[in-house]
Image (cartoon, rainbow, N blue to C red):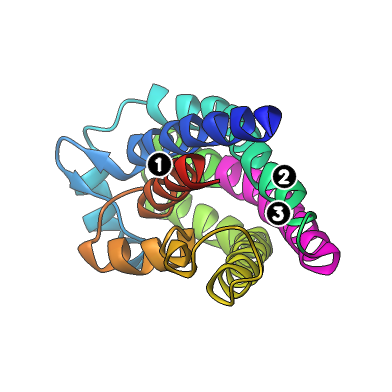
Amino acid sequence: MHTIKNLMMIAVLGHLLCGICDCLIIYTKSGKFGFQLMKDNGKMQEVFRTMPLRNPMLSMLLGVLAMLMSFGGYYALGLWMSRFSESAAEIMLISAAVFAIPGTAHHVFCGVSEWFYLRMGMSEESKEAIVDFFKQTSVTMIACYLGLIVFSVTLFVKVVSGATSLPSWACVCNSLLLASVLFPLRIGGAGNWAGAIMFLGLLFLI
C-alpha cells in the first residue's frame, strides 16, 4: 500500500506538471489558443505573435516526464483494484497504457506542431502544414481519450457499486467527472487539473 500511495502522489505532481505544459502552449500575452483558431491564420498569428519559441519545446520535453509520472498513478490504481476485481484491474491497467502511450505521443505532436508553426514564420503554408500534421496524427489523441474514458468508467462503476473498500460517494474522485465540471470553464489543462484532484482525493481515501 505504501508503494501505491507513493505512485499516486507522483501522479498528482505529474498531472500538475502536465497541466503547466498545456498552459505553455495555450496561453500567450496576446491571447489564448483554441483549436477553432486553426481555421483562420490571421487569428492564430495574433495569438502566437508573443509566444516564445522555447515554450513548445519545454512543453514537449517536460510533458513526456509528466506523462510518465502520471502513468504511475494509473498503474497503482490498477494494482489496488486487483484486490477487489481481477477483471476490472486488467481493464484499468490496459486502458491506462492506452491512455499514457498514445497520450505521450499526442502531447509531443502538439508541441511539435506549434514549434514548427512559429519557426516557419506563422505563414499560411505553415498553418496548412501543421493542420494536416495534426489531422494525420489525431489517432493518438482519440486513443488517449478512449483509454482515459474506459479507465474512469471502470473505476466509477466499481466504487459507486460498493465493490471496493471506498464509500460509494468516493466515486466523485474520478477524472472524467471532474473534467466534465472543469471543461465548460474553458480552463487550459482542465483534464490534468482533474487528474491531479482525483489522485489527491483518492490518496487520502484509500
Q: Image point 50% across, 40% down: which residue?
A: 203
Judge the density around disc 1: few (<14), some (14-19), many (≥20) Cα neighbours within 10 Å. many
Q: Which x, y percent locates residue 183? A: 31, 64
**Quarter assignment of residue 105:** top right
> As drawn, is 197 to the left or to the right of 70?
left
Secondary structure that dominates the magenta span: helix
How far apart are the alpha carbons under marks 3 and 2? 7 Å
Type of the residue with mark 1: Asp
Q: Which x, y percent locates residue 53? A: 39, 26
Which is nearer the N-term, disc 3 or disc 2? Answer: 2
> As drawn, is 88 to the left or to the right of 14?
right
Please state which of the two labelled residues, at mark 1 or mark 3, is closer to the viewer. 3
Q: Which residue is mark 2?
A: 75
Q: Image point 36% across, 43% down: which residue?
A: 122
**Location of residue 165 with respect to 50 vertically, above or below:** below
Judge the density around disc 2: few (<14), some (14-19), many (≥20) Cα neighbours within 10 Å. many
Q: Which residue is mark 1?
A: 22
Label pair 2/1, CB-CB below 8 angstroms = no
Which is nearer the N-term, disc 2 or disc 1? Answer: 1
Please state which of the two labelled residues, at mark 2 or mark 1, is closer to the viewer. 2
Label 2 secondary element: helix
Q: Which residue is mark 3?
A: 96
Type of the residue with mark 2: Tyr
184 in magenta: no
Q: Image point 30% across, 67% down: which residue?
A: 181
Task: Identify the magenta region.
Answer: 85-109
Which is nearer the N-term, disc 1 or disc 3? Answer: 1
**Quarter assignment of residue 84:** bottom right
Type of the residue with mark 3: Ala
Label pair 3/2, CB-CB below 8 angstroms = yes
Please state which of the two labelled residues, at mark 3 or mark 2, is closer to the viewer. 2
Label 3 secondary element: helix
